[in-house]
Amino acid sequence: MSEVTKYQLVPNNNNIVTDFRSHFSFFRSKKSSAFVYGVVFVFIAFTVFLAFSPSSSSTSSSTWFINFFTVNNTSPPDQSLRSHLSPISPQIPSNFTQISQTNSSRSQNITSFQLPSSHNLTKIPDKVENLKINDTIIQSSIIPPQISPISSGKDENLNLNDTNYPEKQSDQSNTSSTSSLVHPEISSPTISPTTEITTVETANSTKIKSGGDEKGVKEDGVVLQKERKSSRNDTGSGEPQKQEKKEKEKNLVSSLIECDLYDGDWVRDDSYPLYEPGSCKIVDEQFNCILNGRPDNDYQKLKWKPKGCTLPRMNGRQMLKLLRGKRLVFVGDSLNRNMWESLVCILKSSVKHPKNVFEAYGRHTFRTEASYSFVFKDYNCTVEFFVAPFLVQPWDVKDKNGTIKETLRLDVVVEESIHFKDADFVVFNTGHWWTHEKTSKGEDYYQEGSNVYKQLDVQEAFRKAVTTWGRWVDANINPQRTHVFFRGYSSTHFSGGQWNSGGQCDSETEPIRNDTYLTKYPWKMRTLETVMKGMKTPVSYLNITKLTDYRKDAHPSIYRKQRPSTEEKRTPLRFQDCSHWCLPGVPDSWNELLYAEILRKQFQNT
């Protein structure tokens, strides 16, 4: 107790002041006081200088010192300035120090970002371009403290006057004006709460997307979408119609799969024919009935309508697309030439540049040579015809007297076969020449090996010939490459005789409507069908026999020549063609069936 009271302070104010003064007795001299006041003044002046005149160099300026004045600054930044910064402020890093002008020339209007020399900061993307903030130096005090750093990119100056697109979009200049990119003027885009702009609505109310799968270019806060292919894609208005059209086409083709295309009727369709009569210069005189003076044209207005489905109308351009880079070859007699000319006319009438369709050797008549080829240059395809009325090879042999006589080698396919075995599509036919006198009699005409038959029935000769053809197809044609067709027998309508004995059809202007008046099914087709059943190679059978039997109205008859001979003028009714067909006419429907078969095969393979 005595120790506590010994050291207890006595409440005497005079003693406290006296003690305080004793501690600072050093300052009693005038020199010492002046020194202290001078040090304090210099410290305060230096502090004020640093506070209001910071260095522009990020390395010499003390970061903590600047933050001392900025962290406690609670006054809101200028709102107009914030609106100018809106396109980029979400992407400025939190430790970003300041924005300063790096180019002394004000005419360039360039403002650049100066980042601290810290290795853990990423650079500003090169897609951020053309930003100007009125050449104002913006202190870090206006930067929100909670902004995430920019993900990636190159540190580069932002040039407002540079409106050039990046090199990868230079092909935009090749697009039409309707599909070019829209660049509206937007004065002050609203700042996005996220780190990237997703949509911008332009002046024409079209929304342009960025980010995700879409590539774009940012400019003045607007995201410009990558070039689109066509103006229809800009609005999307054509897509539903395109999809609906494709769906209809798919349903139409799928309906052909189980349909018998060759059981039906001829119906009137005023949208036919498929090309303007008289417009196709390659039509042989023999088939050009309008040019030869035929007065009626109702036979051109009929189309074939299967009972179980709708036969697609021949689309010439679509057919050419199917044939692009390919060869389609017709092999057979003059009826196949009839069909070949029809197809060339249909396709030629559909192209944009008819001058790019021409016969490979410059020919303009098509009855004297062994083969012909029409080139469709824009599609890099050919439509060809090889003359082979029997499909097997005509031959010459010497008899015992040394006389050369003609025979038909039933065991040898035509020698031209080497030229079409690798074609993409081959359409064969035979039939009409087997009704001629020499083939019908079969005397010293048919040959196998070195043996010339003294007498051979025409039906047996025909069976041997088509069997030879079938074996050749199986041995030489690759079904993975070549689609094989056989066009059936085309009916004739001679009345009162045959082609060489006064048969006539010139008075016929209407097709047969009653099936009871149709002829019997030809034995040749029965034989052919039996042979095809035994083949390994699939063959698409264009069985047009019945549908042609209805059409007694569509032959050239007396309108087969423009300038008949004197004898033909004298007795015109004796010289009629009731086996071939006028063009435009019935063979156009054969080609529509060919088109349908190709579509059907293509659909089955997909």
Image: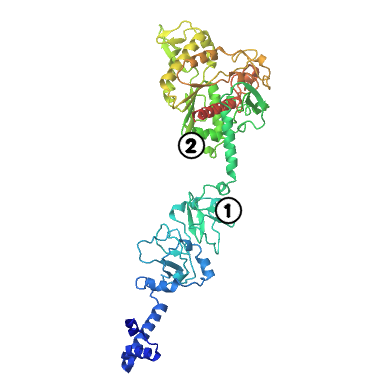
| Mark 1 element type | loop
Q: Is residue 344 left or right of residue 18?
A: right
**Image location (x, y in percent) of residue 370:** 47, 23
The image shows residue 66, relative to residue 153, as above or below, that is below
**Amino acid at pointer 2:** Lys
Which image quarter: residue 552?
Answer: top right
The image shows residue 211, relative to residue 312, as above or below, that is below
Q: Quadrant of the N terminus?
A: bottom left
The residue carrying mark 1 is 206
The residue carrying mark 2 is 377
Q: Is residue 324 left or right of residue 299?
A: left
Q: Earlier in the sequence, mark 1 or mark 2?
A: 1
Nearest the viewer among 475 and 500 is 475
**Measuring 47% from the left and 69% from the top, which residue is drawn there?**
142
The answer to whether residue 283 is visible is no
The answer to whether residue 593 is visible is yes
Question: Which residue is situated farthest in the bottom direction here?
Answer: 30
**Amino acid at pointer 1:** Thr
**Image location (x, y in percent) of residue 320:** 52, 34
**Image location (x, y in percent) of residue 318:** 54, 34
**Image location (x, y in percent) of residue 373:** 48, 29
Q: Is residue 199 left or right of residue 53?
A: right
**Measuring 46% from the left and 67% from the top, which residue is drawn there?**
143
